[in-house]
Image (cartoon, rainbow, N blue to C red):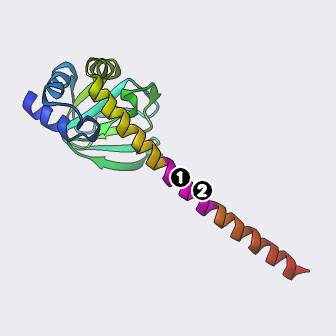
Amino acid sequence: MSLARDIDVLRRVPLLSQFTEDQLRLLAFSAETMQVSKGGTVFNEGERADGGIVLTIGKVQLETGMGRDARPQGTYGPGSLFGENALMTEGKRPARAVALEDCELIRIRRALFSRMLQEFPETARKLYVDKANQFTSAAAALARVGRKLEEVEALNERHQQEVASKRK
């Protein structure tokens, strides 16, 4: 485990990009390092999420379902953050994470992240603005989807009326 390498990886995580070098150093020093062997489970679907986990070395696959019903949801490499929302609020893991290679990870517990934001209110403000902008963008995208669905429903309704009038 190298503190310099961990800081470099944390710097690449979009959520943490607002953190200064000293803040990243404090975070890397205070967080827990985890090692998971190839084939091992990093976390399970439905498990209580007590914070975020950053992959520093290796590859991880997220999957939903179990056994024969397991469906891959993506493969991730160093710099990936699992549980971004769990850094700020209670929740459950939406997927299972399996190590495709021997992995090193950094576990950032919610309490540590919260303490960092309390200690550095300017960084907290920047994160708040970024999250608000993401929320606004997502809401605008959903509004566009909603309008398209309304158009589809109107077309379907007209089609149903045409079919019904031809039957008469």
Q: Nearer the viewer, residue 163 or 148?
A: 148
| SS state under label 2 | helix
Q: Residue 27's x, y, as percent?
A: 20, 24
Residue under the image location 26 percent in, 17 percent down: 119
Q: Can you tell which quarter of the image residue 8 is in? A: top left
Which is the main secondary structure of the residues drawn in magenta?
Answer: helix
Residue under the image location 24 percent in, 35 percent down: 18
Q: CA distance from mark 1 to mark 2?
A: 6 Å
Cβ atoms under marks 1 and 2 closer than 8 Å? yes
Question: Label 2 sits on what residue type?
Answer: Gly
Res 146 label: 2
Q: Residue 26's x, y, as percent?
A: 17, 21
Other-residue count near label 1 (Cα within 10 Å), few / some / many at <14 / 14–19 / ≥20: few
Image vertical order of residue 69 relative to residue 93, above or below: below
User: Does 142 lie within the magenta span?
Assistant: yes
Residue underneath mark 1: 142
Residue under the image location 28 percent in, 34 percent down: 40
What quarter of the picture does the N terminus occupy? top left
| SS state under label 1 | helix
Q: Which residues are magenta?
A: 139-149
The residue positioned farthest toward the right in the image shown: 168
User: Does 59 lie within the magenta span?
Assistant: no
Question: Label 1 sits on what residue type?
Answer: Leu
Image vertical order of residue 118 relative to residue 137, above or below: above
On screen, residue 139 versus residue 18, left or right, reads right
